[in-house]
Image (spheres, rainbow, N blue to C red):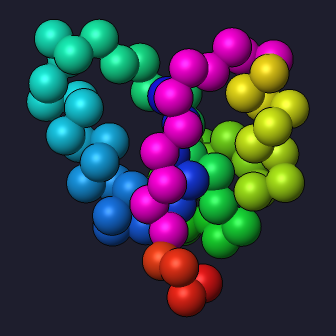
């Protein structure tokens, strides 16, 4: 899965799945137009890069964690 939104909400979602590994989700990265300074390596690209990444990596789930006001 990938998460749209490298922010506290996206991080909370990622931590949930990491703490529930029995659900079988594999984290592939965040996508955001703003790269956090504390973990830039976790952001795989900008929002415009999602489609290509998901097609190339056969991503099964995309979770949206950005504010609708952004």
Q: Magenta stretch containing residue 58, yes or no?
A: yes
In reply to whether residue 65 is colored magenta, the answer given is yes
**Res 9 → quadrant:** bottom left
Task: Identify the residue shown where x is 25% and y is 54%.
Answer: 12
Which residue is at 53% across, 79% downward?
68
Q: Residue 63 in the image: state x and y as whole percent.
A: 47, 45
User: Start and end of the magenta stretch?
Assistant: 56-66
| Above or below for 26 versus 69 | above
> Residue 19, percent across and down?
13, 30
Q: What's the residue at 50%, 68% (across, down)?
A: 66
Relative horizontal placement of residue 7, taking residue 22 as reference (left or right): right
Viewer-proximal residue among 21 and 23? 23
Q: Is residue 67 visible?
A: yes
Q: Is residue 22 above or below residue 70?
A: above
Quarter occupied by residue 35: bottom right
Q: Nearer the viewer, residue 30 or 52?
A: 52
In the image: residue 47, left or right of residue 7: right
Q: Is residue 6 visible?
A: no
Q: Does 8 appear above or below 60?
A: below
- In percent of width and height, residue 44 lies at 68, 41
Quarter of the figure that contains the C terminus: bottom right
Give residue 33's quadrant in the image. Answer: bottom right
For this view, does 58 lie left or right of residue 68?
A: right
């Amino acid at each position: 899965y990938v998460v749209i939104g490298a922010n506290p909400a996206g991080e909370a979602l990622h931590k949930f799945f990491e703490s529930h590994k029995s659900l079988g989700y594999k984290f592939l990265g965040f996508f955001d137009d703003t790269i956090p300074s504390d973990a830039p390596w976790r952001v795989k690209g900008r929002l415009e890069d999602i489609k290509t990444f998901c097609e190339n990596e056969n991503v099964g789930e995309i979770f949206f964690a950005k504010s609708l006001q952004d």
